[in-house]
Image (cartoon, rainbow, N blue to C red):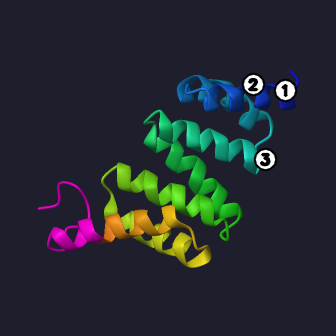
Amino acid sequence: MDLLEEYRRANFVFESGDPLGASRMLEPIVEAEPRNAAVRLLLARAYFNSAQLGNAEAQLRELIERDPSDHYAHHVLGRTLERAGRFSEALPHLRLAAAMKQHADYETALQRVEAWVGKNGGRTSYGDE
């Protein structure tokens, strides 16, 4: 298997709007090249876009463990946790990403989660009593 060609095909499939198909194509590439951050990040994004949030979280945590200064991985992990309704866990990652890099998407996500937590009387995840 030509891993680079498979990665390019998976990227095309992802960009064409089929994140589930892309994730299936990327899984064996990550298995073959576990230290390749670009492939792992695309797999995490494919998982996120296909609502496989637990899988996305695992890939993003692996990326952050290897490179804690990866602002984009922190942002996507924060968004993944937000989407899962785990707002208290999302906030530190969103704050860190916004502090590391000025980006409108980072700031918007951070403000959204901070507002949600503030409006819900300190509840920090969906379903807290």
Q: Is residue 2 above or below residue 32?
A: above
Answer few, some or many: residues within 10 Å of disc 2's Cα (few below 14, many 20 plus, some between 14 and 19): some
Which residue is label 1 attached to? 5
Residue lying furthest front:
104
Quadrant of the snapshot with the C terminus: bottom left
Q: Position of residue 4 (x, y in %)?
A: 85, 32
Q: Relative to residue 66, is residue 20 drawn left or right?
A: left
The circle drawn on residue 36 is 3
As measured in the structure, the alpha-carbon distance from the residue carrying label 1 to the one carrying label 2 is 6 Å
Label 3: element kind: loop
Residue found 47% across the figure and 33% down from its top: 50
Residue 22 horizontal/vertical position (percent): 62, 27
Q: Please give left or right for residue 11 compared with residue 109 in the image.
A: right
Residue 8 horizontal side relative to residue 23, left or right: right
* Disc 2, SS: helix
Q: x, y percentage for residue 5? A: 84, 26
* Amino acid marked by disc 3: Asn
Label 2 sits on residue: 9
Query: For the residue labelled by badge 1, is the local secondary structure a helix, a strand or a loop?
Result: helix
- At horizontal 36% and vertical 49% (from top left) the residue drawn is 83
Q: Amino acid at mark 1?
A: Glu
How crowded is the residue under tag 3: few (<14 C-alpha within 10 Å), some, or many (20+)?
Answer: few
Q: Which residues are magenta?
A: 115-129
Q: Tell me the number on the disc at residue 104.
A: none
Q: Amino acid at mark 2?
A: Arg
What residue appears at the point 56 percent right and 25 percent down from the top-left corner? Answer: 18
